[in-house]
Amino acid sequence: MTEKQQVCVYTYWVTEVWEGSNMVSRSSELMSVSCSSGGGTSGGGGTGDPIATPIKVELKPDSLKKKFPCAAQILESLESYPQLSDFLAPFIKIGADSVKANLSWFDDPKLDWNSVGSTTYGETRSDPKQRVGSEIYLNSNMLKNSSPALISTVMVHEMIHAYFNNITTMQGYDVVADDSKPILERLSEYAKVSASLNGRDHLTILASYVGTIAEVVGLSDGNKKSKEVYFKLAIGSLNNDGKTPSNTFASTYKDLLDKINKDNKFSITIDNASQMISLNRSVPKSERAKCLL
C-alpha cells in the first residue's frame, strides 16, 4: 500500500516585455493553487477531492468614510449579515489568497442625476491597479438625498456587477471554482438574449438573486417596509439592456418577473418598480440616513 500524497498545481501570471525579438523583462506572480489528495493503493486510486483556497475579499470604503461616513456605515452593516456573505461566497472562490478581489468604493458627483431623463445611481469599473477587483462609484446626490434602503440596494447591486466581472475575468485565465460554474452558466445563457453585458447581468440578477438582495436590504433597513417594497427596489433598476436592447430582452425580462410574482404572490410591474425607485430617490430629511444631514 502506498502512502497518500498531496499533489498541487500552481498557476502563475507571467508578464513578459519584448522589444522586437528580444525579451527585456519577465516576471511571474502566483495566481492560484489547486491541490488534491493522492489516490488509494498501488496499482490504482484517484486524485481525490480538490482543495480550493477561497479569496478573501476586502471592501475599501475609501472616499465614503471621509465624505459620507454614514454610507460607509451602511456598507459595513451589509457585510455583517451572513445572508450576504453566503450569497457572495461563490463569487469570491476564484483563486488563491494572493489574488485579492478588492472592492474600492467612492462617491462621484458627476454621475447623471436628472429629474427628467437618465439617472445613474452607481457604476462599477474595473480597477486598473489589479487584475481582480473593482472600483464602485456611488452617485453623490443619491448619498445626500435618497433613503438608506435605496442606497443599500444600489450597493448590493453594484457588488454583484463587480463579482460577475471578477469570475468572468478569472474564467479567461482558466481559474474557475466549482461554486461559480452555475453562475457562469447563467451568465452565458442570458448573454444570448441581451445586447449588452449590463443586460446580461440584470437578467441573471432577476432570475436568481433578487430575493437575496431584498432580504439583505430589508435587514439593513430594519424591515420598516414590506417585503414587496424591497423586491421592487431590487427590481426597479434591472430593466436596462443598454441604449439598443435586444429583441428578446423584454420578453425574457417579463417571463422572469412573472415567475417572481407567482412565487411570492406579488403584483410587481416594470412601472411600479421604477416608481418605487423614484419615491426613494429624494426623501425628506427625516427619512435620510442621519449622518448625511
Image (tube, rainbow, N blue to C red):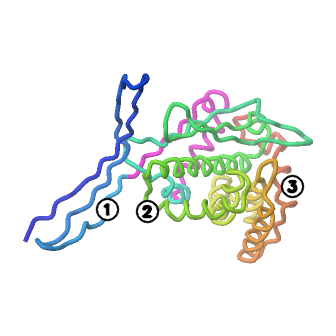
- Spot occupied by residue 153 in the image (x, y as percentages of width and height): 69, 51
Residues packed near mark 2 inside 10 Å, few (<14), some (14 to 19) or many (20 plus): few
- Cα–Cα span, label 3 and label 2: 39 Å
Where disc 2 sits, the SS reads helix
Q: Which image quarter is the N terminus in?
A: bottom left
Q: Between disc 1 and disc 3, whose residue precedes?
A: 1
Q: Quadrant of residue 231?
A: bottom right
Which residue is the site of mark 2? 178
Question: Residue 205's quadrant in the figure?
Answer: bottom right
What type is the residue that disc 1 sits on? Pro
Residues shaded magenta: 54-82
Mark 1 to mark 3 CA distance (whole Å): 48 Å
- Depth check, mark 3 against mark 2: the one in front is 2
Question: Which residue does the image show at 49% across and 35% down from the upper left?
Answer: 130
Residue that carries the numbered disc 3 in the rendered image: 275
| Residue 65 colored in magenta in the image | yes
Tell me where residue 204 appears, x and y as whole percent.
65, 61
The kind of residue on which mark 2 rests is Asp
Whether tag 2 and tag 1 are in contact, CB under 8 A, the answer is: yes
